[in-house]
């Protein structure tokens, strides 16, 4: 009879340990999902909250224009840094985010010779291109460029880091004379 009680006690201890183990795993997954998926959510949020480029270039404010793609690992890596910068400067600077996979932005992709992403173009309040960054950038580098806009900074377009993603051809998009993108 006593051995039966020990077996049920052992079984209930095992069940408790098993339940605790699964609870820890579930909590870890919930906590880590923000770190793992946060950059992808940020990129989507950027695209949704983006100012229309035509408005940005005509409202007498400097403009931060980033070309990105949801699949771009470097874009995802930079997203948290860009989010901090956006939160700090969004009252004074237009933030425009254009997904290179959207045929609607083809005109801008061609006009700014985008062939690697992320590409960040910074414009002064008169919509003059001041500087172009292609590839992975440090947040401080971008912040310095934004702050220098007020000091009439004039830089040549340059590649400061060659770690970028080559744009993939969008096979779902077929241009046609009837398209309205």
Image: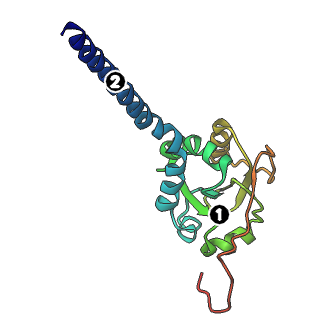
Indicate whether 115 appears above or below 1.
below
The image quadrant where one finds the N terminus is top left
Foreground of the two, 76 or 112:
76
Foreground of the two, 17 or 28:
17
The image quadrant where one finds the C terminus is bottom right
Q: Residue placed at 78% from the left, 62% from the top?
A: 115
Q: Nearer the viewer, mark 2 or mark 1?
A: 2
User: Which label was assigned to residue 127?
Assistant: 1
Secondary element type, mark 2: helix
Mark 1 Cα within 10 Å, few/some/many (few <14, many 20+)?
Answer: some
Q: Position of residue 139 (x, y in %)?
A: 63, 38
Q: Residue placed at 66% from the left, 48% from the top?
A: 73
For mark 2, what is the residue? 20
Secondary element type, mark 1: loop
CA distance for labels 2 and 1: 58 Å
Q: Residue placed at 35% from the left, 29% from the top?
A: 23
């Amino acid at each position: 009879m006593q051995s039966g009680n020990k077996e049920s006690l052992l079984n209930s201890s095992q069940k408790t340990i098993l339940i605790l183990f699964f609870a820890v795993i579930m909590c870890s997954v919930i906590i880590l999902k923000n770190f793992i998926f946060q950059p992808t959510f940020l990129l989507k949020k950027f695209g949704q909250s983006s100012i229309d480029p035509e408005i940005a270039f005509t409202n007498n404010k400097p403009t931060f224009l980033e070309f990105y793609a949801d699949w771009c690992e470097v874009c995802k890596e930079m997203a948290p840094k860009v989010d901090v910068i956006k939160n700090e400067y969004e009252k004074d600077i237009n933030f425009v985010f254009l997904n290179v996979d959207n045929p609607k932005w083809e005109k801008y992709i061609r006009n700014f010779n985008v062939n690697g992403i992320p590409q960040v173009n910074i414009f002064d309040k008169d919509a003059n291109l001041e500087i172009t960054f292609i590839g992975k950038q440090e947040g401080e580098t971008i912040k310095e460029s934004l702050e220098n806009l007020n000091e009439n900074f004039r830089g040549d377009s340059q590649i400061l880091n060659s770690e970028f993603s080559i744009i993939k051809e969008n096979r779902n998009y077929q241009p046609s004379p009837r398209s309205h993108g």
